[in-house]
Image: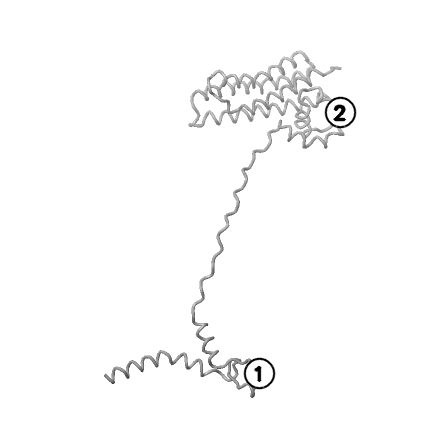
Amino acid sequence: MELYKFITLLLVSSSLLPFFAEAICVPRNSSNVYRHPEASGTADAPGPAMSFISAATARSPLPPPVSSPTIQPPLPSPVSSPSPPDSPTHSASILPLLSSNAALTKICDVTDYPAECLATVAPFLAGEINPISVLKIGIHVLQKSFEVATAVATKLINDLSTSAVVKDALDTCVESFDSGVADLNDALAAISGHDIGRLSTLLSATVTYSDTCEEAFSEQPHLESPLKEMDQHLDKLASINLAISASLQWS
């Protein structure tokens, strides 16, 4: 029994030995060395008890930091599609730059869409500005627009998800757009030959091609045209060219 008590006391003493050793055996040059207030001249120097508390505090684990709640960034606003070339907002943005160009403004004023006329022609202006030069630019822009519309319609036709009914209507659109490109080539030749009658006939035909495309969809119930906005743009460009051609005075 005495032996058991001795072993227990020895174990307890061993476990406390590091704490007392650290509390008592402090280096002499440490700021934690205890000095009597009268010897050091100050009553603020911590003694062995404070050293023991400091050591115990250093060994105790710190509480985990409180993480702040994660703040989710706001969702980005939907990215709006760029304004089409015939958008009034797009056109209005360049109007102040063109206000001093009286010649071009006068030519475009004869059309039903003067703002769209300015926006279409202005980027390609070079040299003399007159109705013929403006009309040639308008014809080239309409040609490119027909080609773009053909490419879009062809891509939809080749899409496996496109229904057979929609493909039939798109086939009609492609035929109309191809006819528009051909007629505009002939229109440029008519300008060179000063053939005002043929020019008027060809440009009048280009106004109908976008309508033909839309009618192919409207003939089917509940069938919406995927080319509606593009056809509206083509219609405006064709109308602008026709109006300018009607104002030509051949010398």
Query: Where residue 176 is drawn, which disc sits there?
Result: none
Q: Residues within 10 Å of mark 1 (few under 14, many from 20)?
A: few
Q: Give left or right: position of 9 versus 199.
A: left
Q: Residue at x 58, y 22 (%)?
A: 232
Name the residue at the left extreme.
1
Q: Give left or right: position of 74 versus 139.
A: left
- Residue 170 to residue 54: above or below: above
Q: Give left or right: position of 182 versus 6.
A: right
Q: Nearer the viewer, mark 2 or mark 1?
A: 1
Contact, mark 2 vs mark 1 (Cβ under 8 Å)? no
Q: Position of residue 237 (x, y in %)?
A: 63, 22
Q: Residue 121 or 34: which is nearer the viewer?
A: 34
Q: Position of residue 91 (x, y in %)?
A: 66, 29
| Residue type of the residue flagged with mark 2 | Ala
Q: Residue 139 or 67: which is nearer the viewer?
A: 67
**Label 2: which secondary element:** helix
Q: Position of residue 36 (x, y in %)?
A: 53, 86
Q: Residue at x 51, y 80 (%)?
A: 46
Q: Position of residue 15 (x, y in %)?
A: 35, 78
Query: Where residue 103 is drawn, which disc sits there?
Result: 2
Q: How far apart are the two marked residues, 2 and 1, measured between alpha carbons?
A: 97 Å
